[in-house]
């Protein structure tokens, strides 16, 4: 039985003067909603931050979730580099990847990704705009690591082509988890914060 890990990327710089994952939404840091969505069977949880200066900012939260804070050395953006970092940092045989700025993601969806990674080397949702979501996905460690080592210059699209059995999930198929596809909602401006807060408060009523 392959053991799952999870890595939450919080190497996104600052948002309105605060480290992005720690920006409060409806009373708590937005990364907490993401950490709360990680299935119980995942025991190895990592929070990837940009540099050593961010470690202390996230340490109390990491302790609360029995997570490790790891330093990626760069901001999120290069999908291959981010996933190579994940492969080299996790302890499990398969892993879930999540961004810190997706506060509306749910455990029902992440559990599906974790479970599917037992069978498929990569489980890649497509957003409503049909873009591949490399950082809201799950992977088997060894096949991905082998492609990274054998093909050091390939981008992620070509890397996935080399993985035998990778599966893409259409956004329409994911509506069974959330009709509004909120798992793809990312906070990037004040209007997004307001939208997320309205949704979360409605859920808590």
Image (spheres, grey):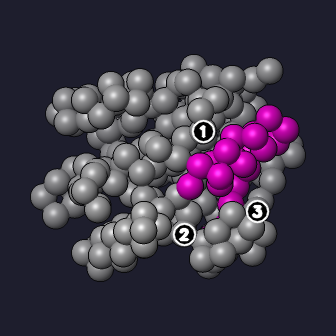
Instruction: Check disc 3 and report the residue beneath it.
Output: 169
Instruction: Identify which residue, 167 or 144, lies in the foreground.
Output: 167
Q: Position of residue 173 (x, y in %)?
A: 78, 69
> Alpha-carbon neighbours of circle 2 within 10 Å: few (<14), some, or many (≥20)?
some
Instruction: Identify which residue, 26 or 116, lies in the foreground.
Output: 26
Real-space Cα separation, disc 2 to disc 3, in angstroms: 15 Å
Residue 83 appearing in the image: no
Q: Position of residue 32 (x, y in %)?
A: 37, 46
Residue pictured at 41% horizontal, 24% vertical: 66
Instruction: Check disc 2 and report the residue beneath it.
Output: 182
Q: What element carries label 1?
A: loop
Which residues are drawn in magenta? 106-127
Instruction: Check disc 1 and report the residue beneath it.
Output: 39
Residue 4 appearing in the image: yes
Instruction: Identify which residue, 156 or 52, lies in the foreground.
Output: 52
Of all residues, the one furthest to the front in this rendering is 205
If you read the primary sequence from the N terminus, does the residue marked by circle 3 or circle 1 appear first?
1
If you read the primary sequence from the N terminus, does the residue marked by circle 2 or circle 3 appear first?
3
> What is the quadrant of residue 111 in the picture?
top right
> Alpha-carbon neighbours of circle 3 within 10 Å: few (<14), some, or many (≥20)?
some
Q: Nearer the viewer, mark 2 or mark 3?
A: 2
> Alpha-carbon neighbours of circle 1 within 10 Å: few (<14), some, or many (≥20)?
many
Query: Does the magenta segment cover residue 99?
Result: no
Of all residues, the one furthest to the left in this rendering is 17
- Quarter of the picture containing the N terminus is top right
Query: In screen coordinates, is 48 left or right of 86?
Result: left
Mark linked to residue 7 = none
Q: Where is residue 106 in the image (x, y as percent from the top left)?
A: 56, 55
């Amino acid at each position: 039985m392959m053991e799952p890990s999870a890595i939450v990327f919080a190497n996104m710089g600052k948002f309105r003067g605060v480290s992005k994952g720690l920006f409060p939404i409806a009373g708590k840091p937005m990364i907490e909603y993401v950490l709360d969505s990680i299935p119980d069977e995942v025991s190895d949880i990592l929070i990837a931050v940009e540099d050593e200066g961010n470690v202390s900012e996230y340490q109390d939260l990491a302790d609360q979730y029995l997570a490790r804070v790891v330093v990626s050395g760069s901001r999120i953006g290069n999908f291959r580099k981010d996933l190579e970092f994940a492969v080299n940092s996790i302890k499990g045989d398969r892993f879930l990847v999540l961004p810190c700025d997706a506060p509306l993601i749910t455990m029902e969806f992440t559990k599906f990704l974790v479970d599917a990674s037992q069978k498929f080397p990569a489980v890649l949702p497509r957003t409503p705009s049909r873009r591949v979501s490399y950082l809201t996905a799950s992977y088997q460690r060894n096949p991905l690591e082998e492609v990274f080592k054998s093909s050091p210059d390939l981008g992620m699209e070509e890397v996935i082509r080399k993985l035998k059995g990778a599966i893409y999930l259409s956004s329409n198929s994911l509506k069974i988890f959330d009709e509004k596809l909120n798992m793809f909602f990312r906070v990037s401006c004040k209007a997004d914060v307001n939208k997320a807060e309205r949704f979360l408060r409605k859920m808590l009523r």
